[in-house]
Image (tube, grey):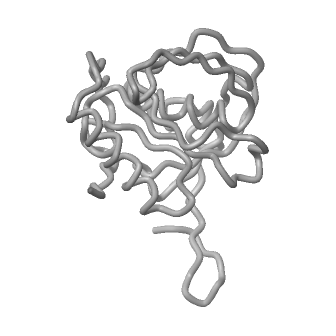
Amino acid sequence: MTREVVVYPDRRLKSPAVAIRGVGPAVMRLAADLERTARAYPRTVGLAAPQIGAMWRMIFVDCAGHKQVPDPRSPRILINPVVTAGQGSEVGREGCLSLPEITANVRRATSIEIDALGLEGIPVHLVLEGFEARVVLHEIDHLDGVLILDRVASLATDVFPRKIRAASGTLRAAG
C-alpha cells in the first residue's frame, strides 16, 4: 500500500531505526510499501523506511532513467545497509520528501562501498559512485536519524526554498 510520507519536524525522522533480524512477511510488506510510496512521487530516487513511519533499517533506491546514472543497479531494496568505505568529496544539491519545502547543498563521498542484505536475505556488497552513491548515503542517513539540514555547512547559505512548477508552467518558490 502507498503510505503517507512523514514530514519534519516529526520526531521519528530524528530517531535511529532498528536492524532487521530476518526477511519474513512483514519485511516483504514493508519493501512493497516503500516501493509503492516512492513511485507515487515521480521524481523520487530513494526512500527510507522511517520516512513512511516504519523504524526499520531498510531503504528503496531506484536511479533508473536518471540522467546522472548511466548504468544503475535499480530498483533495489537494501536491508541493514552499512557504509564500509568512502572516497572523494563533492557538494551537491539534494531534496527530500520529508522536507518538501527546501533543497540543500550537502557534501558527500563520491565513491562508496556498502554491505547490506538484499530482499532475498542474501548479503550484497555494492560499489557505487556519483549520484547513485549520494542517493544511498542520503537514505542511510534517514536510518540514523540524520537529515540534510544536519549535513549543511551553513543554514544561511546552503538551504534554499524548493522551486515548484505552477499550473501555468512557470517556476515559483514553494511555501
Quarter the C terminus occupies: bottom left
Residue 151 found in image quarter: top right
User: Residue 63: x percent and y percent?
Assistant: 63, 46
Residue 56 located left or right of residue 86? left
Q: How many labels does the image show?
A: 0
In the displayed structure, 18 sits above or below 30; it is: above
User: Residue 139: x percent and y percent?
Assistant: 48, 34
Quarter the N terminus occupies: bottom left
User: Residue 117: x percent and y percent?
Assistant: 44, 20
Give 112 or 145, whichever is nearer the viewer: 112
Hey, which residue is sitting farthest bottom in the picture?
168
Please name the residue shown 30% across and 58% down the image. Answer: 2
Hey, which residue is sitting farthest top in the picture?
84
In the displayed structure, 72 sits above or below 126; it is: below
Please name the residue shown 62% across and 21% down the image. Answer: 126
User: Residue 34: x percent and y percent?
Assistant: 36, 46
Please name the residue shown 47% across and 18% down the image. Answer: 116
